[in-house]
Each structure stands twice: as C-alpha cells, then as structure tokens.
Image (spheres, grey):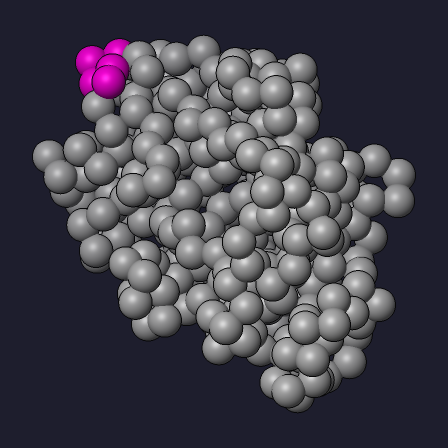
Amino acid sequence: MKTLPCYKQMPWGGTNLNQNYGKTSPFSLTGESWEAADHKNGRTPVCCGAYAGAGLGELASVFGRDFLGENVSSGAFPVLFKLIDSSDRLSLQVHPGDDYAARDGDNGKTEMWIVLDAKPGAGLWLGLKEDLTREQFRAKIDASDLEDALNFIPAKPGDCFFLPHGLLHAIGAGLIIAEIQQSSDATYRVYDWGRMGIDGKPRPLHVEKALDVTDVTMRGGVSPSFSYVKNNALHTVFSGCPLFAAERIAVEGGTELVCDGSSLQILFVSDGELSIKAGEGVQTVAKGSTAVLAATAGRSELCGKGNVYRFWVPTERDYAALASYGCASDIIERMYNK
C-alpha cells in the first residue's frame, strides 16, 4: 500500500524533496515530508489499491495485529517515518520521554536519522562538548551563548545517528535525512539562531520544558551498522532500539522479504525503481515513494534495481539473525540500544 505524503512548511526547508525525490509539496520551503504517519499533526493515507483513502490508524483499528504485528501492543500505528530537507540549520531542540510528553498529550520521541545526501562540510550538533550543570546550561541559553558549547559531528551519506530522548541536538544545513521515530511531534526548542519564522516573527521557544528533559551529559556520534548478503541483496542494518529497526537493501534484479506476522514493514525507495509483489497485489514504487506492508502479508518479492530502506518493530529473532551472519554480540547490543 503506497502512501500519500503530508508536507510541512518550515523556515529552514528547501525545494530538494520536490526536485530530487519526486515530491509535490505546494510550499516554497518544504522542511519535512511525512511518509508514514498517523498522528494528530499529520496523517498519510493509502493512495492506491483496495484501501485507497484509508488512514494507517484506520487500518490498525480494523485489522489490529494482522496489520500492525504481534510486536505492536498499543493497537496504534507505532512509528512515524519522514524525510527532512535542511537547506538551513534546524533549531537547537530536545525531545521528551513518554511520561513527560504525556503532559502535552503526546508520546515521547526517540528517533534515528540516516543521511541520504550531504553537501561538503555538512553536519549536525549532538549534545554538548563538555558536561554542564543545569544552571550553567540555563545561563548559556539566557545569554544566547550556546553555539561554541555544542558538539558538532560531520555527516556524510550513509551515516546513521541514534537520538534517545533527552539528547540536545540540531540538524545542520545541506542535509537530506530519512528519519524513523516514535509516533510523536513533541519538540522543545532551546535556540533558533535568531531566525524569523514563516510569518516573519520569532518562533516560540520552550526553554523551561527543555531544561526539564535535557540530559546535559549526553552527546552523540555516528552509530554502528552491519552489512551482510541475503537472497542476492546487500543488507545494511542500522542502529535502532526496541521501538524501531532500520536497514538499507541494495536490490540488483530481485530479492525476497517475509512479513511473518511480527511487525508491519515500511519501505522507502531512495533511488531506482522497484516493483513490490505481496500476495496477489503488485505496486511499482519509484524513487522517493513509500509503501507499507501489513505484518501478515507473507512473502514479498522486490524486483528491479535500487536501494530501499526498510523500517519495522524488531524482536529477539532479529538480533539472532544478525548473530547468524557474524555480527558480534557487543555490536548488536549497541545497534539496538538494548
């Protein structure tokens, strides 16, 4: 089931998603394309086939775990997958955990980024160079003196970054990022570089909430990945957590996926064109398009040439599969943040 994106206008956005990934955003500055979402701030209905027009939440309500999978206990669509175009740097921000986010009627937000494209010198900020006390952190916010204190990490295509809730962060200019995250839009801005919003006014900050949830001792970096060959395709598994997992599959001709009832699958084609056959249904998925496979779809065939990113909710079987391909146990522990 291919999805219809939900576009977000942002002052730091650009035109790359339309130009390079076949999107049709009506905005002059598109920051985000929500590709698979069922959230109060954005939903992505199915755009073809027997369920055209249905939302992912509707499918979850009607089909339950046949659609979501045995790993998803909440009964709701569990994740949000989006593309980000940072033609300018994003605000410095932090996300809360589940308990704190519930005060605002949302879920917590742990996320993971995969860099699809990067201009020379591009990078992002993940945490602080040195530990600060809460009081020192507040003083730097009040004095607009945070830039030199931030931990800058260069980024290149293929890099993966895992961001637990509580990590202070900002995406720099010149990046295209694929993001998988909890189904949440809980974001607390700390600093916005003196920028004006789309309406010409400063965007609101959420300093007190950010102070409450930021772990000032946490800093990030490039996360580990592991590659192996299966069914004539190169699989590269990225970092994730019990909430979500991610891999890139380089397809050269054809390969097979199995939806065994454990989790739904989100497939995003980053380049090339693939046909996906599940049961009696066949869909052509071009570069920039996203499809969702039900957990009980069974065996699926991917035919064509291109790279497809797969996102799902993992189980112990996934960890064991990596071990069977030679991935060391300490790398598996780090990759899945167990």
Name the spot of residue 83 as percent of width and height, x first. Answer: 56, 34
Indicate whether 165 appears above or below 184: below
Q: Is residue 148 magenta?
A: no
Give the residue displayed 18% in from the left and 50% down from the top: 75
In the image, taking residue 223 as reference, residue 259 lies left or right, namely left
Q: Residue furthest front?
A: 201
**Spot occupied by residue 102 in the image (x, y as percentages of width and height):** 29, 65
Residue pictured at 82% horizontal, 44% vertical: 122
Q: Which residues are magenta?
A: 49-53
Compared across the picture, whether 17 is left or right of 266 comes to right
* Residue furthest right in the image: 120
- Magenta segment's dominant SS is helix
What x and y, as percent, mark residue 329? 58, 70
**Left or right, 152 with reference to 248:** right
Residue 196 versus residue 329: which sits nearer the camera?
Answer: 196
Is residue 220 found left or right of 336 in the rendered image? Answer: right
- The answer to whether residue 100 is visible is yes
User: Could you say which quadrant of the image residue 294 lies in?
Assistant: top left
